Amino acid sequence: MRPTMTDVARAANASLKTVSRVVNREQGVSPHTAARVEEAIRSLGFQRNDLARALRRGQRSRTVGLVIEDVSNPFYSAIARGVEDEVSRHGLLVIAGSSDEDPGRERKMLQLLCERRVDGLLVVPAGDDHRYLLPELALGTPIVFIDRPPRRIEADVILLDNVGGARRATRHLIAHGHRRIALVGDALRIFTAAQRLRGYRQALRAAGIPLDEALVRLDCHGAAAAELAVRGLLGLPEPPTALFTCNNRITTGALHAVSDLARPPALVGFDDLELAPVLSPPVSVVSYDSVELGRQSARLLCARLAGVDCPPRRIVLATTLVERGSGETMPWADGASGPKRPDLRAQRPVPEVVCR
Amino acid sequence: MRPTMTDVARAANASLKTVSRVVNREQGVSPHTAARVEEAIRSLGFQRNDLARALRRGQRSRTVGLVIEDVSNPFYSAIARGVEDEVSRHGLLVIAGSSDEDPGRERKMLQLLCERRVDGLLVVPAGDDHRYLLPELALGTPIVFIDRPPRRIEADVILLDNVGGARRATRHLIAHGHRRIALVGDALRIFTAAQRLRGYRQALRAAGIPLDEALVRLDCHGAAAAELAVRGLLGLPEPPTALFTCNNRITTGALHAVSDLARPPALVGFDDLELAPVLSPPVSVVSYDSVELGRQSARLLCARLAGVDCPPRRIVLATTLVERGSGETMPWADGASGPKRPDLRAQRPVPEVVCR
DNA sequence: TTGAAAGCGCTACCAA
DNA sequence: TTGGTAGCGCTTTCAA
């Protein structure tokens, strides 16, 4: 069995309270007694039970819950890292879980986290009604929403400048002569998807380009769906000359769809990709610091935990357009035969003899 | 204040025990009483305190601790996802933390997790001596090591076939006519780095190619260091004609280093990259299922939690070579001028007028 | 079917 | 400087 303070007290021939004092480095223990207790702790391998401690002190579990769509998506795992960096400075650990964009799972995860008495919650919300969190908020659990605002409740939220980023990306493509610019995006119930569509429309309107519904492909969840959508766009009688892809997975899918094209359309994606600079052409993106997104969210949460009590805050982080090449090309003249993107495999000698 | 069972009992005019029975869906409560209690639970917004419950039941916190190098590295976050998928089926949550390859941080994290009484631990170990975990193991906390074996203790571990994968990668490059194959790897104290070097050496030896120390670049931690190392290799009087890059970050760095070369060396990387197929040329890699790596580790942990008591297991997962193009090119004949990798930006018209 | 009392491992309060 | 005792919110045991 695992030794308790009582065991240590017995072994050290001291009282429970004295052991507690030593463990918690409180004043008022004679060096001699302290040494005896320390020795007992060492020999028994005692480790304080934080569950019991928290219960007694009326504390929570000294953890924060983080609910994101998918811990294995680089965008979200970067957030997780930012959160960890920030909260670990306060001795808090992070319980992270994936909602898979399912409001039911999200709610269940949040419920589990509340039952474990997390000190605070960080959520990239998937649901469309978060009123069920009101009692928890009222009980003093701070909740900070990340990347998307909560629905039907007021709470702290850290967002990206989605509209601005999308508008800039689209305007950038227009500036390079494109008029048939497709948007490939996720379902509109997702806040960021809707906002990015808004920015796209604003840029078109500002340039006097009518919106062509055929060029707007929504509900692309994941790379595979996006790849299909882009193939569909390219098969149109009048295909787009440029693509605006609304998140990292969609950009990835689009790149798969255009990778074997002799003349790929121009492309700007929302979210940066680690390999964007080494693709050919290098991929231009709307970028921002996603670790910082997590860090700021956690910072706000920690401020709330420390008692900062102001009305719900709404922080918007800037996005920047990173020009790398894929978004800075003009449309091909119709029917003109332009230079092809070469197949390197064909260019380089391939051996005829393969050993073993 | 947060309502407790006592509050519910008072509100429902029932005893504490009766409330407990209702909350835990135990038998022996009359429907009428149960309804009254349910109503009180709803109206007060009662939520059972899992901390107190676990304490009383002598349970742990119903969480597993996961210590990895960096939650934001796709390799590790994929593991985290696999772990989550598996343990969530048992009602367990995941506390994940980053060690940053620092044995001190690793130890501290593990200590924190033990104090919070996690049910089990999953660790990608960074340290070189894990004997400090022996007491915890003896107390019945199952620990499964992932990707690298523990040092100086016996415990469950799930590994990849590093030697086999590296050998196959190197042999593959040899088969395509390369004899000057560089290895870019991490510090040898990291198990996987050492094993992959071993596989590389085995393949060279089998082909009768003497090892050229100048072509072995170790201690490359992170993409930036790898990029530098590759630039160094390419600046050699007799540069390598092929690269074997030992992990995902190193491959990324190498790709940065060769991205602007007219004639990039052949390349095979260990770890797959999401964008590998759309790079030019597409990148050949030693691949495996990293979500599965996490899932299997968690499965073993859960088996231990369920009481499976056999000697420590060592499971090795297979790796496969995925040929995509970058590893299937012959070396350039010395001094011959081969076809260049074209710059797409130059090929395509760039607009002269940019609006606003 | 219902409830009183003890106690999980710890800390807080007060007394010696 | 030291220690007894109560109690955090819950479950368990046993009695009514």
Image (cartoon, coloured by chain):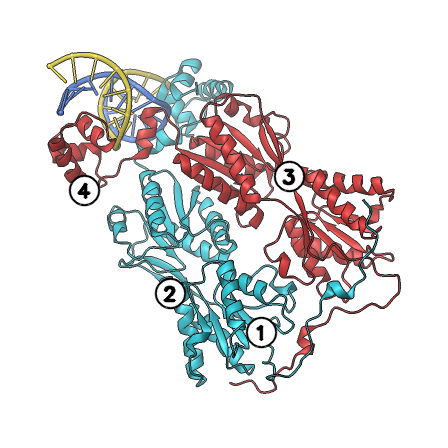
Chain colours: A red, B cyan, C yellow, D blue
- Identify residue for label 2: B188
| Cα–Cα span, label 4 and label 1 | 57 Å
Discs 3 and 1 share one subunit: no
Residue A42 badge: 4
Residue B190 location, x and y as percent? Answer: 38, 61
Q: Residue at x 44, y 47 (%)?
A: B87
Residue A178: image location, x then y, percent = 83, 52
Q: Nearer the viewer, residue B63 or B47?
A: B63
Residue B46: give x, y in percent of width and height.
Answer: 46, 23
Residue assigned mark 3: A318
Residue type for callout 3: Ala
Q: Is there CB contact under 8 Å for labels 2 and 3?
A: no
Q: Chain of mark 4?
A: A
Tag nearer the camera, 3 or 4: 3
User: For residue B47, which quarter of the picture?
Assistant: top left
Q: Amino acid at mark 4?
A: Arg
